Image: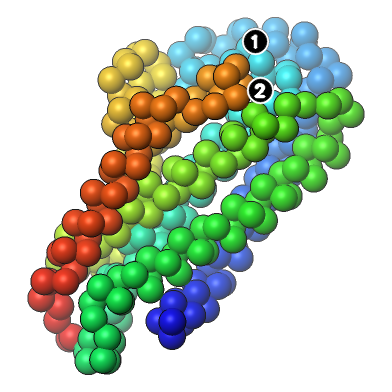
Amino acid sequence: MNIFLHELKANRKSTIIWTLSLVAVVIFFMALFPSITKDAEGFKKVLENYPEGVRKVLGVSINSITSLLGFYSYVFTYVVLCGAIQAMNLGTSILSKEVREKTADFLLTKPITRVQIVTAKLLSAFTSLVLSNVVFIAAAIITVKAVSGKTFDMTAFLLISLTAFWVECLFLALGILISVTLPKIKSVLSVSLGTVFGFFVLNMLGSVIGEKAIRYVTPFKYYDTTYIMKHNSYETTYVIIEILFIMAAVTVSYLIYSKKDIHAV
């Protein structure tokens, strides 16, 4: 419990900054929505002048961009990107920082098992993500209601909003796996940004070339907002893939960390 609270406190500042960043993104973009709907046809004509490949890279759908959920889905692409970086940062740093900051001897000589250490750190990172998403979704609901005078499908809205959390969970698990696999991580940010943007570029590449197989590789493709708006649900196949990946990544991380040689200096 002490490790959990210590990690939660240590991550408090970054959690607040990332949460405020997510809220700022949704407020900034959604504030543009009323002006877009005033001249929806003109806005669509402007977008039609862009090459189809560019529209796909940006995640713009002309058919739905002027609807509330359609525009929110477009905005949400960048929210998910920011959330993924936050999760990857947490995952990559929580187990590697003892080596990086040369405090492993202090932690590992305590009367606790390595399994307990991983569990406490993992739960603290998971709690940080939960808190970020609770605040973000509450802010998003208030913002969307403020800029829209019409009713909208709240179920679809919440399902879309929650996809950020599901993607973050996957990157958290991936970050932990990388942190226990690599001998030493000198810069968490470079590893996190490199990994997340690598998947994001892969996501854009898949959108342009229309390669369905890429959907299985990049987490950014697991939750298709068009499908969610149409069916009010997620695609089961990708939910199962994510669950299996998280379970495998976390299990392997426990096994590696339990037997890993960790140098104090």
The reply to whether the C-beta atoms of the residues labelled 1 and 2 are less than 8 Å apart is: yes
Q: Which mark is residue 30?
A: none
Give the image location of residue 101, x and y in percent: 30, 81
Horizontal side of 182 relative to 52 (left or right) equals: left
- Badge count: 2
Sequence-first disc among 1 and 2: 1
Give the image location of residue 1, x and y in percent: 43, 82
Residue farthest along the right direction in this orientation: 149
Q: Residue at x 36, y 60 (%)?
A: 91
**Which secondary structure, mark 2?**
helix
Residue 172, placed above or below residue 58: below
Horizontal side of 251 relative to 226 (left or right) equals: left
Residue 97, placed above or below residue 110: above
Kindly indicate the quadrant of the structure image that contains residue 177: bottom left
Q: CA distance from mark 1 to mark 2?
A: 8 Å
Crowd band around label 2 with a 10 angstrom C-alpha radius: few (<14), some (14–19), many (20+): some
Q: Residue at x 35, y 34 (%)?
A: 240
Q: Nearer the viewer, residue 99 or 46?
A: 99
Quarter occupied by the C terminus: bottom left
Q: Which mark is residue 70?
A: 2
- Mark 2: which amino acid? Gly
Horizontal side of 48 relative to 180 (left or right) equals: right
Kindly indicate the quadrant of the structure image that contains residue 103: bottom left
**Which secondary structure, mark 1?**
loop
- Mark 1: which amino acid? Asn
**In this rendering, does residue 99 appear at all?**
no
Q: Residue at x 31, y 65 (%)?
A: 187
Give the image location of residue 207, x and y in percent: 41, 19
Q: Which mark is residue 63?
A: 1
**In this rendering, does residue 98 appear at all?**
yes
Residue 111, placed above or below residue 131: below
Give the image location of residue 226, x and y in percent: 56, 19
